């Protein structure tokens, strides 16, 4: 008797092997974007001459000037080295509650800037120790 042929997969003419692969991880490719230029310069915008932050500080300096003109600053106690203007700045900082009150925060910035300007240009601050005509105790530094 003749031997029967075994039908294996490799002997079939149209048979293809089944390959099972694990799925590859999905990789997202991000395209590089060009950085956008901000709206600086000029009068408006975030960094312009008339920016919101700068105008707030100007308003703060205006309020400090009004307090000085009305005579309210003369009745305030003074802190050493920063004088009455600096005392206004420290008081406004305490009122600003960590920057929540914007006007008080801007008054604080303006008053401290004005106190630093007076101290560096004249050697004393309004309401500081000593006569305004003399240099005061800061000259010993």
Image: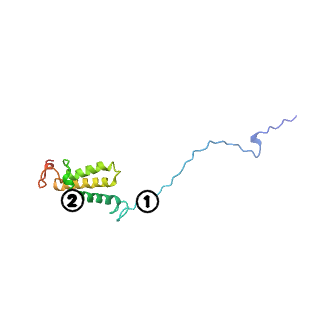
Rendered image: mark on residue 84: none
In the image, what residue occupies the spot 29% across and 59% down?
A: 59
Rendered image: mark on residue 36: 1
Q: Residues within 10 Å of mark 1 (few under 14, many from 20)?
A: few
Q: Residues within 10 Å of mark 2 (few under 14, many from 20)?
A: few
Q: Nearer the viewer, residue 19 or 104?
A: 104
Along the horizontal axis of the image, is 41 left or right of 125?
right
Q: Please name which of the two marks, 1 or 2, marks the residue nearer to the observer.
A: 2
Q: Secondary structure at mark 2?
A: helix
List the single residue furthest toward the right: 1
Q: Nearer the viewer, residue 17 or 68?
A: 68
Q: Position of residue 128 (x, y in %)?
A: 17, 51
Number of numbered callouts drawn: 2
Along the horizontal axis of the image, is 122 left or right of 3?
left
Q: Position of residue 9 (x, y in %)?
A: 75, 41
Q: Earlier in the sequence, mark 1 or mark 2?
A: 1
Q: Position of residue 87 (x, y in %)?
A: 23, 50
Q: CA distance from mark 1 to mark 2?
A: 46 Å
Q: Nearer the viewer, residue 103 or 123?
A: 103
In this picture the colour scheme is: rainbow
The image quarter containing residue 103 is: bottom left
Looking at the figure, which quarter contains the N terminus? top right
Q: Nearer the viewer, residue 116 or 7?
A: 116
The residue where tag 2 is placed is 69
| Figure check: 99 above or below 20 | below
Q: Position of residue 83 (x, y in %)?
A: 19, 51
List the single residue furthest toward the top: 1
Cβ–Cβ under 8 Å for marks 1 and 2: no
| Figure check: 98 above or below 61 | above
């Amino acid at each position: 008797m003749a031997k029967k042929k075994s039908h294996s997969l490799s002997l079939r003419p149209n048979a293809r092997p089944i390959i099972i692969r694990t799925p590859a991880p999905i990789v997202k490719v991000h395209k590089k974007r060009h950085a956008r230029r901000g709206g600086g310069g000029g009068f408006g915008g975030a960094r312009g001459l008339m920016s919101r932050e700068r105008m707030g500080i100007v308003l703060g300096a205006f309020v400090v000037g009004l307090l000085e003109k009305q005579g309210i600053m003369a009745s305030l106690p003074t802190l050493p080295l920063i004088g009455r203007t600096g005392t206004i700045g420290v008081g406004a900082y305490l009122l600003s509650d960590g920057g929540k009150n914007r006007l008080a925060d801007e008054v604080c910035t303006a008053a401290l800037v004005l106190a630093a300007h007076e101290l560096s240009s004249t050697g004393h601050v309004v309401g500081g120790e000593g006569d305004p005509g003399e240099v005061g105790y800061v000259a010993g530094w």
